[in-house]
Image (spheres, grey):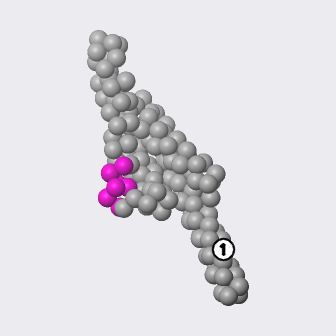
């Protein structure tokens, strides 16, 4: 009887150790993918150094959107693996977060007194995309920090 209990106990410990190792490896892979998103952003952003000109506007807007998509894919995978959300919930959670960030920054950049008086034009859109990209990056960094503590 003691051997059976010991065997069951040993199986539980070993399975937990393997599960933890798998989670740590998966987290490392996610961090690697996240780093690739950031590196790609910085490399591509150097292709158009005149950020104030209209010729860069479309390029930079698309770059920010593609980087945000890359970040949200990493966040979705984090939610699916470590937060027990299904795919629809994970998609909804990160999309709602990104949308809220964008709307808040757009309000900050577009609705201030200066822009109302001087018509800032499309700059508020680009600034909002920029701020959203980096807010998502910070959010995912915080998730990684929290998961590293608990894994």
Residue 130 covered by magenta stretch: no
User: Splitting the image into 4 quarters, where does residue 103 fall?
Assistant: top left
Toward the viewer: 97 or 107? Answer: 97
Q: Which residue is mark 1?
A: 13
Residue 137 in percent (x, y) is at 50, 44
> The C terminus is located in which quarter?
bottom right
Q: Is residue 103 left or right of residue 16?
A: left
Toward the viewer: 122 or 143? Answer: 143
User: Splitting the image into 4 quarters, where does residue 125 fall?
Assistant: top left
User: Splitting the image into 4 quarters, where does residue 56 fall?
Assistant: top left
Q: Is residue 79 above or below residue 118?
A: below
Q: Which residues are magenta?
A: 87-93
Residue at image location 46% in from the left, 43% down from the top: 136
Residue 124 in percent (x, y) is at 35, 28
Toward the viewer: 120 or 4? Answer: 4
Residue 110 in percent (x, y) is at 32, 23
Extreme residue toward the front, this view? 1
Residue 138 in percent (x, y) is at 52, 41
Residue at image location 47% in from the left, 38% down from the top: 135
């Amino acid at each position: 009887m003691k051997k059976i209990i010991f065997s069951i106990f040993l199986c539980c410990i070993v399975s937990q150790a393997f599960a933890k190792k798998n989670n740590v490896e998966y987290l490392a892979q996610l961090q690697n993918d996240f780093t690739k998103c950031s590196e790609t952003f910085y490399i591509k952003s150097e292709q158009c150094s005149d950020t104030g000109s209209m010729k860069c506007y479309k390029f930079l807007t698309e770059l920010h959107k593609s980087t945000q998509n890359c970040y949200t894919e990493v966040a979705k995978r984090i939610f699916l693996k470590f937060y027990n959300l299904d795919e629809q919930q994970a998609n909804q959670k990160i999309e709602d977060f990104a949308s809220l960030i964008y709307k808040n920054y757009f309000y900050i950049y577009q609705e201030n007194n200066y822009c109302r008086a001087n018509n800032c034009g499309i700059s508020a859109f680009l600034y909002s995309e920029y701020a959203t990209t980096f807010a998502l990056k910070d959010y995912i960094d915080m998730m990684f920090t929290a998961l590293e503590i608990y894994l």
